[in-house]
Amino acid sequence: MLKYSISFTRRAKKNFMDLPVEERHKIEGALFAFASDPGPHHDVKKMHGPQSSRPLYRLREGEYRVLMYLYYDTLIVEVISVYKRGGHIDRLVSLISTLMLVGM
């Protein structure tokens, strides 16, 4: 039973669906595990940066990173970006544009 429900922004859903099936399953499993029991034993880190009414979190699964907001009052995990870790400039630009779209 999920403690939190999981939702994706449109861009995050597209990025997620573009991943190889095996990687999607791994990330899906990590998200469901975290949403079921959001304790400190998952590889989730609160991101530091400009103060916002919505703290940003990062989930790490292998080479991939998932950026998400946690809404404690409504018990929702909102995935805003899924990307592969690395020095690819196109991923960085995509990440920055995603953050700008969601109002960071």
Image: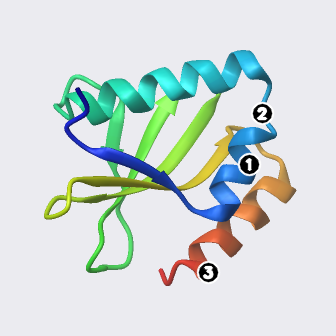
Distance in Å between CA atoms under marks 1 and 3? 15 Å
Q: Which residue is mark 2?
A: 19
Q: Pointers 1 and 2 in contact (CB under 8 A)?
A: yes
Q: Which residue is at 30% across, 72% downward?
A: 54
Disc 1 element: helix
Percent from the top left, x then y, of residue 48? Answer: 35, 62
Q: Quadrant of the N terminus?
A: top left
Image vertical order of residue 50 relative to residue 3, above or below: below
Total tally of numbered discs in the picture: 3
Pick the residue in front: 48 or 80: 80
Residue 8: x and y in percent read: 54, 55
> In the orientation shown, which residue stands out farthest toward the front?
1
User: Which residue is depicted at the point 43% across and 46% down?
Assistant: 58
Q: Is residue 18 above or below residue 76?
A: above
Front residue of 82 and 43: 82
Coloring scheme of the render? rainbow
- The amino acid marked with disc number 1 is Asn
Q: Tell me residue 77's x, y (percent).
A: 35, 51
Tell me which numbered mark, 1 or 3, is placed earlier along the sequence: 1
Label 2 residue SS:
loop
**What is the distance, in whole Å, between disc 1 and disc 2 at their CAs?**
7 Å
Between the C-alphas of marks 2 and 3, the distance is 22 Å
Which disc number belongs to residue 101? 3
For label 1, the residue is 15
